[in-house]
Each structure stands twice: as C-alpha cells, then as structure tokens.
C-alpha cells in the first residue's frame, strides 16, 4: 500500500470521526434519570452526615471534659478536706501535750 | 440556580438536566464512541453533580465544572474498559473465556464497544495518546467547545491547549498510519 493511499485513508478516518453524528437524550433516559435523582434526594446528603458526626463528636468531647474537670475538682476538694483534717489532728496533738504539761 | 440546587429544589435539578444533558451526553459519546455507555456515564455525571453540589465552591462556571466531571467520568470508563480487555486477554490465554462467556450468557466484555466499525482505528489511535492530549483533541472535535472553554475545563492556558491539540493530531495521524499498515 502506497504512502499516499495510507494518508488518504488516515484523513478519511479522521473526517469520519469529526463527522460523527451527535446523540440526544431519549425519553427513557430522562425518565430513568429522574427516578435516580429522586432516589438520591431522599438519601441525606453526605455533607450533612459529616456535619452531624462533627457535632456528635464535639458533644462527646465536651461531656468527657466536663466529667474530667468535675472529678479533678472533687479530688482537690477531698485533698483540701484531708489537709484540714490533718491540721486539726496536728493541732490537737500539739495542743494536747502543752495542755498536759500545764 | 446554584442556590436553588444547593437548597435541593427539584425544579432546579430538572432544569439543570434539561440544560446540560445534550452536551454532557455528546461529550461522553465522543470519548466512549458507544451510545449505551455514553447514556450510562452521563447519568453518573449528573448524579455526581447533585451529590457534590454542596462542595462546589464556584471558582469556575457551573457548566465548566459539569463538563470536567463528564470528562473525568469518561476517562474512568475508558480505563475500566482497558482493564476488562486485559482480563479478557488473560482469560483467553488460560481458556477461561469459555467459562466466563457461559456465565455471562454469551456476551463478551468488549462486545458493546465495537459499535462503530468506521472509527474503530481512530479509537485505537486515541487509546495510545496521553490523557491530556486525548482530552484536548476529543473536546476540540465536539461542537460547542472552543479552545478557551477547553482550557477552562482542563484548568490550563489557551496556549497549552493549542499545543496539546496540534501534538495530538500529529500523534493520531502517525498511530493511524501504523494501524492501517499493520492491517493491510
């Protein structure tokens, strides 16, 4: 096959591709598209789902932080009360020997 | 329209499909060269549009964004076909094709692809192009796309698009010559 023949065929193939007729959506396609879109619309949006999850995680973090803070506060209060008790005992111990001596 | 779409307005959805379905379908068709596949992929395009409309930031035109999705979905479909072809070739070597043919009820995986015999060789030549050249060349052959719009879709400059198209043309011609010589 000569080069010129090949070139002609190449050009012909390219023009076949360029001249490809356009297609348009059929009624069937439009109907099935509408059904699929309707089905998608009834499913909650993924963006909204992630926002909901973010809010839930935030609430969980806040609850945990609250529990942690309150437990620390109770512990520190208990420590203070223990300290005061010790102080009282110590005072008693200190006072008592003096009073005994007197 | 964008606000209405984001709000989930059904009428806006229908209008969007009405406005863009023709061009989206023809874009997919030029890439896939098969009507049934083009119809399936264009539905996937609109579903993707509706699912991701909340994340569309409006940096580009809505139409450009939709055509970008159409191009990317079409390229994905082409990749899927190539994978299927490779699997079919392996099955043929291992004589598993008879089993899969029996399982699929007699339909071979790439049977639907061979729709237009006249442009079969062009399709083979296009398969040998890099993705960016293929996109630029194919879009330039679709009525309604100018080089400026192609540049927007490809997120590149006008000069780059012109260069891609001319390189693609040369490569397609060379590849077609090789294919036709081997066929004879």
Image (tube, coloured by chain):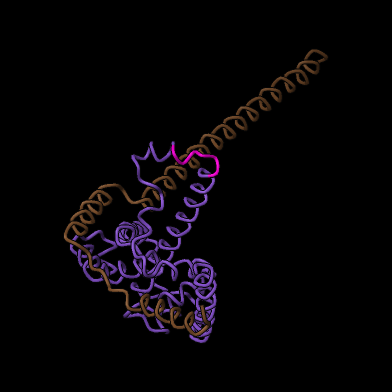
Chain colours: A brown, B purple
Query: Within the magenta stretch, is there residue B102?
Result: no
Quarter of the image holding residue A86?
top right
In percent of width and height, residue B118 lies at 36, 69
Residue depicted at x 28% and y 74%: A21
In percent of width and height, residue B178 lies at 55, 72
Using residue A56 as the reference point, say whether residue A21 is left or right of it.
Answer: left
Residue depicted at x 62% and y 32%: A76
Residue depicted at x 47% and y 82%: A5
Give the answer, above or below, for where A32 lies relative to B154: above
In percent of width and height, residue B41 lies at 34, 59
Q: Nearer the viewer, residue B130 or A79?
A: B130
Residue depicted at x 55% and y 44%: B93
Give the answer, above or below, for where A28 lies relative to B96: below
Quarter of the image holding residue B145?
bottom left
* Part of the protein shown in magenta: B93-98
Q: Quadrant of the C terminus of chain A?
A: top right
Query: How many numbered marks, from 0 up?
Result: 0
Toward the top, the furthest residue is A100
In percent of width and height, residue B112 lies at 35, 55
Toward the front, the furthest residue is A1
Query: Within the magenta stretch, is there residue B94?
Result: yes
Q: Nearer the viewer, residue A16 or A6?
A: A6
Q: Nearer the viewer, residue B144 or A56?
A: B144
Give the answer, above or below, for where B152 lies relative to B131: below
Using residue A98 as the reference point, say whether residue B127 is left or right of it.
Answer: left
């Amino acid at each position: 096959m000569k080069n010129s023949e090949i070139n002609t065929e190449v050009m012909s193939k390219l023009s076949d591709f360029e001249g490809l007729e356009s297609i348009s959506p059929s009624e069937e396609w439009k109907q099935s598209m509408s059904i699929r879109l309707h089905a998608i619309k009834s499913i909650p949006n993924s963006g909204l789902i992630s926002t909901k999850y973010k809010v839930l995680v935030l609430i969980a973090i806040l609850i945990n932080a609250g529990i942690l803070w309150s437990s620390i506060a109770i512990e520190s209060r208990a420590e203070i009360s223990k300290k005061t008790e010790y102080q009282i005992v110590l005072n008693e111990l200190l006072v008592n020997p003096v009073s005994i001596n007197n | 329209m964008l606000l209405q779409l984001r709000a989930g307005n059904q009428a806006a959805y229908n209008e969007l499909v009405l406005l863009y379905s023709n061009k989206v379908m023809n874009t997919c068709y030029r890439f896939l060269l098969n009507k049934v596949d083009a119809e399936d992929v264009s539905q996937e395009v609109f579903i993707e549009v509706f699912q991701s409309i909340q994340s569309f930031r409006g940096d580009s035109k809505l139409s450009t964004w939709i055509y970008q999705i159409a191009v990317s979905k079409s390229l994905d479909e082409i990749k899927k076909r190539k994978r299927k072809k490779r699997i079919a070739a392996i099955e043929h070597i291992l004589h598993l094709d008879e089993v899969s043919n029996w399982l699929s009820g007699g339909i071979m995986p790439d049977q639907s692809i061979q729709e237009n015999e006249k442009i079969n060789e062009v399709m083979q030549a296009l398969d040998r192009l890099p993705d960016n050249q293929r996109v630029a060349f194919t879009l330039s052959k679709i009525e309604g796309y100018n080089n400026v719009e192609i540049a927007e879709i490809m997120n590149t400059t006008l000069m780059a698009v012109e260069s891609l198209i001319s390189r693609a043309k040369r490569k397609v011609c060379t590849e077609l010559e090789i294919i036709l010589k081997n066929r004879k």
